[in-house]
Amino acid sequence: MMAGMTKSWVKQRKRDGYYRKAKAEGFRSRAAYKLIQINERFSIVTEGNVVVDLGAAPGGWSQVALELVGPKGVVIAVDRKRMEPIEGVRLVRGDLSNPATMEAVLEEIERKVDVVLSDMAPRLTGNKHVDHGKSMSLAEGALKFASQTLGRGGCLVVKVFQGDMFPEYAERTSKLFEFSQSHSPKASTSSSRETYLVAKGYLG
């Protein structure tokens, strides 16, 4: 970003209601409210669940998930970036494409996973076709991980940037779950091309 763009972005962020709300309520990112709103509508994460949060840094979704699963649940946060610890959340640092990272995640899972969350997004280039392709690659990784770890009846929430590859991905996902639907929570910015694919009832 150029200096002028950076200043403009910072001003816009500070005017953003969800950004201010996150600061006031102790969430690490405004993205926390996206998961809160998705969960209020679809009841994805419930008490006692085992949840894996992919691309978790800085930790907003993990914070929300931890509150939702309660003391009997488990939240495992995975990211290749360094993330400040969250009390009660198990952290695994690494890229899931690395077998060692996958092994480390599996070691933290005591039983089949109930929910896989992915708010992963690529570093944006400004080219919507390139960004869409990178986004879909991350979404494919999340779906592959979900297929390997979810128990029957499990749920998946994955962020994607809309584009020509999304319909085929959504169709494939729908064949693996009893229910799937794309959804844009109110906390998503109006200018964003992101949407979330919400899938419930993994068929195993």
Image (cartoon, rainbow, N blue to C red):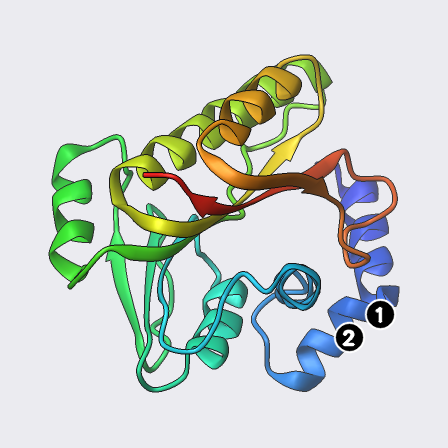
- Lateral position of residue 104 relative to residue 125, left or right: left
Q: Position of residue 34 (x, y in %)?
A: 68, 59
Density class for disc 1 (Cα within 10 Å; few <14, some 14-19, many ≥20) is: few
Q: Is residue 14 above or below residue 88?
A: above
Residue located at (33% from left, 48% from top)? 152
Query: Which residue corresponds to the image point at 34% horizontal and 31% vertical from the top-left?
Result: 144
Nearer to me, 168 or 119: 168
Q: Secondary structure at mark 1?
A: helix
Q: Nearer the viewer, residue 16 or 117?
A: 117
- Residue beneath disc 1: 17
**Kind of residue sitting beneath label 1:** Gly
Asked whether 112 or 126 is in front, the reply is 112
Determine the residue positioned at 15% across, 63% down.
Answer: 110
Q: Are marks 2 and 1 in contact (CB under 8 Å)?
A: yes
**Relative to residue 74, is residue 163 drawn left or right?**
right
Residue 184: % across, % down: 76, 46
- Is 203 left or right of 184, judged from the image as shown? left
Q: Is residue 110 left or right of residue 34?
A: left
User: Whole-Å distance between the Cαs marked 2 and 1?
Assistant: 5 Å
Q: Quadrant of the C terminus?
A: top left
Closer to us: 64 or 148: 148
Q: Amino acid at mark 2?
A: Arg
Q: Quadrant of the N terminus?
A: top right
Residue 173 against residue 72 in the figure, above or below: above
How many neighbours does mark 2 have within 10 angstroms: few (below 14), some (14-19), or many (20 or more)? Answer: some
Q: In the image, what residue occupies the spot 70% across and 85% down?
A: 24
Q: Count the marks: how many?
A: 2
**Mark 2: secondary structure:** helix
Labelled disc at residue 20? 2
Where on the picture, by quarter, is residue 135? top right
- Locate residue 20, reporting x and y percent: 77, 75
Residue 62, image x, y percentages:
45, 67
